[in-house]
Amino acid sequence: AQKITQTQPGMFVQEKEAVTLDCTYDTSDPSYGLFWYKQPSSGEMIFLIYQGSYDQQNATEGRYSLNFQKARKSANLVISASQLGDSAMYFCAMREDNNNAGNMLTFGGGTRLMVKP
Amino acid sequence: DAGVTQSPTHLIKTRGQHVTLRCSPISGHKSVSWYQQVLGQGPQFIFQYYEKEERGRGNFPDRFSARQFPNYSSELNVNALLLGDSALYLCASSLGPGAHAGYTFGSGTRLTVV
């Protein structure tokens, strides 16, 4: 089974509107972390936001917020007030804290977000 | 402060050759991880090193190897290159393998095998 699933290969959003990028995950580890990264065409993975499995509140970082629904195993990224510079690939990733592979990240297949002017 | 530095940025190799990719972590970071990102996919974990020791290995053949030096920089080596090794190779550094360690990625090395 896929550990991280991003079901939206591509999405369009109008500039200044909000958009939600979906991410579901699968783990039996009670302790884990969930990450969102942005990857522009230059290739660099830019960290956006982090949610720990024991965090009681949803994470927020500026225009980014994470809608964490633990029982549903979903960790959707919400971008408010979209900007043209938000156009990029977005990856959801998970780190399971009790595996034997150090602190490796498992990534989803990504969602390409395109912001329309 | 300098971020994670990777070299070279681009590389073209012929099938059967070997390649060495280099990564310098953020100052103070002792852990380096390597990821392979094939076009159109998410990154796949290859190796993690911490304090010069291998702490994790992904599902990659023995043609892939890595090491970490006393200054915490790292090299990824790939032998007997195949066309399928063409990818963006990303390096990530972190303070250590602790549960809440954050990761900072470099811009990657884009390898093309012809």
Image (cartoon, coloured by chain):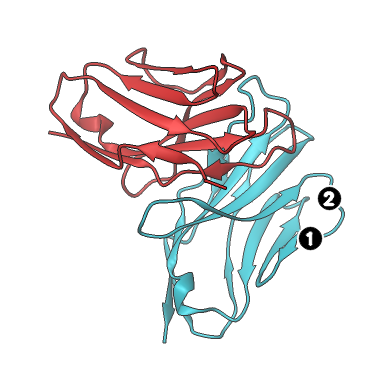
Q: Outermost residue, right direction? A: A56
Q: Visible in this render: residue B113?
A: yes
Q: How many marks?
A: 2
According to the picture, the residue beneath numbered tag 2 turns out to be: A55
Please give left or right for residue B110 compared with residue A100 in the image: left
Report in which chain the residue with disc 1 lies: A
**Are dots 1 and 2 in contact, CB under 8 Å?**
yes
Query: Local crowd at mark 2 within 10 Å, few (<14), some, or many (≥20)?
Result: few
What chain does mark 2 sit on? A
**Chain coloured red:** B
**Could you tell me residue A43's position as x and y percent?**
38, 51
Give x and y (percent) for residue B6: 40, 38
Q: Is residue A105 left or right of residue B7?
A: right
Residue A31 position (above or below residue A25): above
Identified at 54% across, 78% down, the residue is A82
Q: Residue at x 63, y 45 (%)?
A: A25
The residue at which mark 1 appears reads as A58
Chain (cyan): A
The residue sitting at 74% across, 64% down in the picture is A60
Q: Nearer the viewer, residue B29 or B102?
A: B29
List x then y, in percent, for residue A86: 49, 71
Q: Is residue A1 visible?
A: no
Q: Residue drawn at (62%, 27%), measured in percent from left and top? A: B30
Amino acid type indicated by mark 2: Asp
What is the three-letter code of the residue carrying label 1?
Asn
**Mark 2 residue element:** loop
Q: Point out the image quarter for the C terminus of chain B.
A: top left
